[in-house]
């Protein structure tokens, strides 16, 4: 098959060529890729370093195919695969590898599996014509979901869904989303509105209002004053901050009493300064989240189908040009998703 792969980390080492597809095992499924969405994690995989000053990525196998957020159709399956999975089914791939038996999996936290990994990192991923995955990672999707939206659900959508769930955001509370136009930010804004929260999206992109944001604000020296005014002095009940280090103090500055700060991704770095006095005086909760569960993904699919969650595509590339797609993920002019289409 054709694939984008590398023999050692580095964007410059990416090769688009023929890749020998191994035989599928009894409990595995061969998926023909239709749309693979690009995320920061793909860039980290290719460069071998997990984010700003982050640790080395544990990549397997080599030569390696990255690509962790995948939608496609079932091409074939192993002998022991459940008969509810059929050739031609439209599916997305739950991107966390999990054993299904450890204490975290048993409590529906597959993303924390003791023997876990990630498709695109600990196994080959979706920047290819085909990808082989364990049957338990196959999630069927309804016809109402188009490929572009569907391929954005396993990482960006699910991370946002899980973050909002873990924040216990309630109707009429005030939600502030850092990185509002980013992959997860756009989903957080839309899910926040579905919860009927007052949603404030922090971004320089005014079009986020079309996705339900009540206010779109810049992260500047007036941010605290503006949020004070909008919330009638109560400030944010929930702050979603995936940007991390560079904006952390701003997030601490705008959270109100009993507020919850949720963080993941930390795209600008992971050193998060916390003033303990601020924390206890307002009884603030700070919580980290990572991805989400299989059940969460199923719930999100229903939500997307019933309540018309949308995606925004910035650029579409062919499989052959997927190297350019990965290079563009941190482009400061990016307005929406980058996807690789194979249909
Ligand atoms: Zn497990």
Image (cartoon, rainbow, N blue to C red):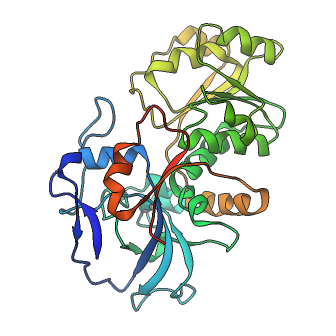
Quadrant containing the N terminus is: bottom left
* Residue at the (67%, 30%) spot, across then down: 206
Image position, residue 21 (x, y; %): 26, 78
In depth, the one of 256 and 258 nearer the eye is 256
Q: In the displayed structure, would residue 197 be above or below residue 12?
A: above
Q: Where is residue 251, by image quadrant?
A: top right
The answer to whether residue 212 is left or right of residue 14 is: right
Q: Quadrant of ligand 1?
A: bottom left
Image position, residue 224 (x, y; %): 67, 11
In depth, the one of 192 and 145 nearer the eye is 145
Q: Where is residue 77, by image quadrant?
A: bottom left
In depth, the one of 265 and 272 nearer the eye is 265
The answer to whether residue 110 is left or right of residue 219 is: left
The answer to whether residue 195 is left or right of residue 292 is: right
* Residue at the (56%, 81%) spot, across then down: 89
Image position, residue 179 (x, y; %): 56, 31
Image position, residue 187 (x, y; %): 64, 45
> How many numbered markers are drawn?
0
Q: In the displayed structure, would residue 20 be above or below residue 5?
A: below
* Residue at the (43%, 32%) spot, across then down: 267
| Residue 206 in view, yes or no | yes
In depth, the one of 299 and 205 nearer the eye is 205
């Amino acid at each position: 098959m054709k694939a984008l792969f590398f023999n050692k980390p580095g964007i410059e080492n990416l090769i688009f060529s023929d890749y020998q597809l191994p035989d599928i095992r009894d409990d595995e499924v061969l998926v023909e890729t239709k749309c693979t969405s690009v995320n920061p994690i793909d860039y980290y995989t290719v460069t071998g370093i997990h984010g700003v000053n982050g640790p080395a990525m544990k990549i397997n196998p080599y030569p390696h195919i990255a690509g962790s957020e995948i939608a496609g159709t079932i091409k074939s399956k192993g002998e022991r695969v459940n008969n509810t999975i059929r050739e031609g089914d439209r599916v997305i791939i739950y991107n966390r590898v999990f054993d299904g038996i450890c204490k975290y999996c048993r409590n529906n936290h597959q993303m924390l599996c003791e023997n876990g990994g990630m498709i695109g990192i600990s196994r080959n991923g979706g920047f290819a014509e085909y990808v082989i995955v364990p049957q338990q990672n196959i999630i069927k999707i309804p016809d109402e979901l188009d490929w572009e939206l569907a391929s954005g659900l396993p990482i960006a959508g699910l991370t946002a869904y899980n973050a909002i769930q873990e924040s216990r955001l309630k109707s009429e509370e005030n939600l502030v989303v850092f990185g509002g136009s980013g992959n997860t930010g756009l989903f957080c804004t839309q899910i926040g509105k579905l919860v009927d929260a007052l949603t404030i999206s922090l971004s320089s992109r005014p079009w986020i209002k079309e996705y339900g944001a009540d206010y779109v604000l810049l992260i500047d020296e007036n941010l605290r004053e503006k949020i004070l005014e909008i919330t009638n002095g109560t400030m944010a009940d929930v702050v979603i901050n995936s940007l991390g280090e560079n904006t952390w103090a701003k997030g601490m500055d705008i959270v109100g009493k009993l507020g919850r700060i949720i963080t993941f991704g930390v795209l600008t770095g992971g050193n998060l300064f916390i003033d303990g006095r601020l924390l206890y005086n307002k009884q603030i909760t700070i919580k980290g989240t990572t991805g989400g569960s299989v059940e969460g993904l199923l719930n999100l699919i229903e939500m997307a189908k019933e309540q018309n969650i949308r995606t925004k595509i910035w650029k579409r590339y062919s499989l052959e040009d997927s190297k350019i797609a990965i290079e563009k993920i941190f482009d400061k002019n990016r307005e929406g998703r980058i996807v690789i289409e194979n249909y």
